[in-house]
Amino acid sequence: MRKSIFFFLPICMFCAFLSTVEAQPCRTVIAYYPNWQWYDRAKLVDPFSLKYQDYTIINYSFFKPEASGLVTFTDAWADENLLLGQINWSTTPPTYYPNTSIIDRAHNAGVKVLASIGGWTLSANFPAIAASATNRAIFASECNRLIDSFGFDGIDLDWEYPGYAPNGGTPADKANFTLLLQQVRDSLDALEIKLGKPLMLTSCFGASPVNAANIDWNAVVPLLDHINLMTYDYFGSWDCLANHNSPLFAPAQGDPAFNLDSTFTMITGKYGVPPQKVNLGVAFYGRSQMNGTALHAATNCTANTQIFGDDDGTPLYYNILKNLHLFDTFWDGQAQVPYLFGKAATQAAGTFVSYDNPASVARKAQYVVDKMAGGVIIWEATGDYLETAPGSGVLAGTPLLDTLNAVFCATPPIGINDPKWHENTLITAEIWPNPTGDQLWISFNTNLSGKVLINLRDMQSRKAFSQTLLTEEQNPVFQLKLPLLSQGAYILQINYNDQIITRKLIIND
């Protein structure tokens, strides 16, 4: 790969060095940053554009566990640039510009970075590592080497999954997984003394009852700082049915255990894991299927890799928004998630997409608050870094990440379901898509009772659209059909009980 030379004005380097610790999320927010995403969109999401202040921990993923216990790079060029910093080729040997790596910039903002080892495609060697005392010792030593070499703050073990036969798992994994964690924890404890700082050990877990049964929770929980549940990938093209990737509650059809609520209830109830130690998975991506006709109807078991070719049919949120004009948007009130179906006479006709948007993310964040869980994990961080226009290279916002933190930081400890909280609360609302064409969705964070007045005005304050909504619902979601409007910027006003919410809305077709 061609190497590039980077030049920086000295004052910029000095400013980076002086960066101060920024505000942190009100609950745990752990984001996975995959090294391969560094290349995407002309390196749009890099160490300089990450919104560190909105994360608690960044899990840098992934390193590969070899069967011998050694841990190797998956992309040495990306790892060098991201973990050590931009290369100064003017020195012999080459050095690294300070405060240009993810780790330096995260630490400047008070955010921890963990080395994530494994992942879905790199878990096949874990059974052999965990089954051998020699391999476990080598693996634990390798974890320490990563921390020593790059300045990580700990290790995230992403074994998908102990006991999972297609990835080489056996029944012995249940006990061996505990032995592996214990070996790593002991090794980290020794390294803490040398480094003079605490080191974290976390792990990701599958959300299904079968995967949960392959974990000795009583032994594992004391060894880990965080229990990260992958509460997504419940349903997909492998089911040959149009169902939700990450439902909050059980859909009308499908395995009733396959939803975030059931997984959390199982882990904290059946297995007694403390809620405050649990982080629930939030998907910044969706899943597509073709030849669908309705929710819960049969598909052809194939993802749409034509429209969503950049993501192999599993589109990140920004790619869903880029193609949203090809789809009609729906809301499943039972599962509390949105979904899409391709519009007739378009290339998306018959394509079903399950995904999360600000409304469903807000509900999941509120669930975390209400259930007194620790927080969330995000797969994956770059998914909602939006550009002002595709290919512009200019960041416009991170709506899903912003929604998580807005809910976490706006909700008092007593929880939204306590009537005392409602006495003086102000409503907040999310709108999507934005930009939009002829459809607009509005969701609210609290109970509404009565009239909600919607006004849309152009930038000269001329009324373009008005509608009065009546509701007696908790966290209502409204779908509005807009008239044919000229392209451009508009001001949306939402009036409820003398409270006014104002949003800028862009009409683009």
Image (cartoon, rainbow, N blue to C red):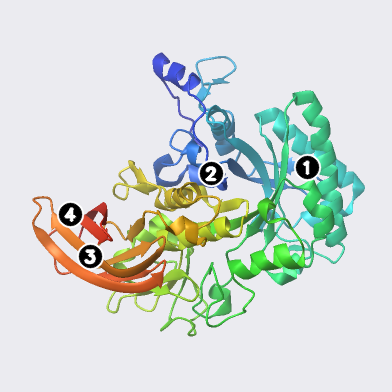
**Disc 2 versus disc 3: distance between alpha carbons?**
32 Å
Q: Is residue 54 above or below residue 316?
A: above
Q: Secondary structure at mark 1?
A: loop
Amino acid carrying mark 2 in the image:
Cys
Which mark sits nearer the N-terminus, 3 or 1? 1
Residue topped by disc 2: 26
Of circles 1 and 2, which is in front?
2
**Disc 3 versus disc 1: distance between alpha carbons?**
62 Å
Q: In the image, which disc is placed on residue 159?
A: none
The location of residue 374, given as percent across then percent down, is 63, 51
Q: Are marks 4 and 2 in contact (CB under 8 Å)?
A: no
Residue topped by disc 1: 70
* Residues packed near mark 4 inside 10 Å, few (<14), some (14 to 19) or many (20 plus): many
The location of residue 481, given as percent across then percent down, is 23, 72
Residue topped by disc 3: 453
Q: Are marks 1 and 2 in contact (CB under 8 Å)?
A: no
Q: Secondary structure at mark 3?
A: strand
The residue lying at 42 percent from left, 83 percent from top is: 294
Which mark sits nearer the N-terminus, 4 or 1? 1
Q: Are marks 3 and 1 in contact (CB under 8 Å)?
A: no
* Residues packed near mark 2 inside 10 Å, few (<14), some (14 to 19) or many (20 plus): some
* Residues packed near mark 3 inside 10 Å, few (<14), some (14 to 19) or many (20 plus): some
Which mark sits nearer the N-terminus, 4 or 2? 2
For the C terminus, which image quadrant?
A: bottom left
Of circles 3 and 1, which is in front?
3
Q: Is residue 135 left or right of residue 244?
A: right
Q: Is residue 46 left or right of residue 489?
A: right
**Which residue is at the front of the view, 317 or 460?**
460
Amino acid carrying mark 3 in the image:
Leu
Which mark sits nearer the N-terminus, 3 or 4? 3
Q: Are marks 3 and 4 in contact (CB under 8 Å)?
A: no
